[in-house]
C-alpha cells in the first residue's frame, strides 16, 4: 500500500474499532454481516473476499499494534482472506491514574507523547 492507502486503511480500521466498542448493535452486525458493517466504516472488500474476525487476539499480536493489522490487510489484498482483529473494549483502571494522567487523557495527549505532535491524517501546515 502506498502512504495514502495506508492512512485510509488505518482511519477506517480505527472507525471500525471505535464503533464496535461504542455500539453493541454495530458489533453484532460485524459478527453477522461483516462485509456491510466494514463497508459502513469505510473498509470495502473485494467481491468474493473471505472475512475472518478475530475477537481473541493471538499471543504475540498486540491489539494496539497497528502494524500487525496493516500487514494482515496487505496479506488479504494478496490472498483474498482478510483477517481483522477486533479486541474487546479496552478498560481503563481509573484508580491507577493520577490527576496529571487524567488531564492528559482529557486533552488527548498521553504522558509518553512529546509536546511536538505531528500527524499524517491530511496534508496541512500543522503536519510539518
Image: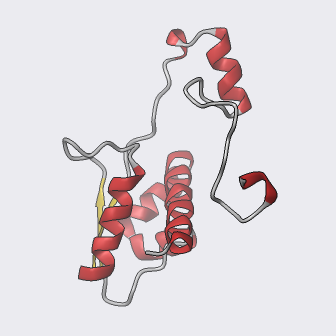
Q: Is residue 76 visible?
A: yes
Q: Residue furthest right?
A: 125
Q: Is residue 63 above or below residue 15?
A: above
Q: How many numbered callouts? A: 0
Q: Is residue 55 above or below residue 91?
A: below
Image x and y of residue 98, in percent: 60, 9
Q: Is residue 56 above or below residue 103?
A: below
Q: Residue at x 38, y 46 (%)?
A: 65
**Left-right relation of 123 to 39:** right
Q: Return the residue nearer the eye: 14 or 53.
A: 14
Q: Return the residue nearer the eye: 28 or 89.
A: 89
Quadrant of the image containing the N terminus: bottom left
Q: Residue furthest bottom?
A: 47
Q: Is residue 80 visible?
A: no
Q: Return the residue nearer the eye: 81 or 124.
A: 124
User: To which quarter of the image does residue 125 belong?
Assistant: bottom right
Q: Residue at x 21, y 46 (%)?
A: 58
Image x and y of residue 128, in percent: 72, 53
**Left-right relation of 114 to 29:** right
Q: Residue at x 72, y 54 (%)?
A: 127
Image x and y of residue 126, in percent: 78, 52
Image x and y of residue 47, in percent: 37, 90
Q: Return the residue nearer the eye: 23 or 99.
A: 99
Q: Residue at x 71, y 28 (%)?
A: 106
Q: Residue furthest left?
A: 59
Amino acid at each position: 500500500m502506498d502512504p495514502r492507502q495506508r492512512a485510509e486503511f488505518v482511519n477506517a480500521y480505527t472507525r471500525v474499532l471505535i464503533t464496535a466498542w461504542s455500539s453493541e448493535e454495530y458489533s453484532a452486525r460485524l459478527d453477522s454481516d461483516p462485509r456491510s458493517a466494514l463497508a459502513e466504516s469505510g473498509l470495502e472488500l473485494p467481491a468474493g473476499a473471505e472475512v475472518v474476525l478475530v475477537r481473541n487476539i493471538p499471543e504475540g499480536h498486540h491489539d494496539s499494534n497497528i502494524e500487525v493489522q496493516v500487514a494482515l490487510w496487505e496479506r488479504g489484498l494478496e490472498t483474498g482472506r482478510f483477517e481483522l482483529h477486533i479486541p474487546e473494549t479496552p478498560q481503563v483502571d481509573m484508580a491507577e491514574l493520577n490527576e496529571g494522567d487524567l488531564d492528559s487523557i482529557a486533552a488527548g495527549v498521553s504522558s509518553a507523547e512529546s509536546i511536538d505532535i505531528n500527524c499524517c491524517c491530511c496534508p496541512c501546515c500543522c503536519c510539518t
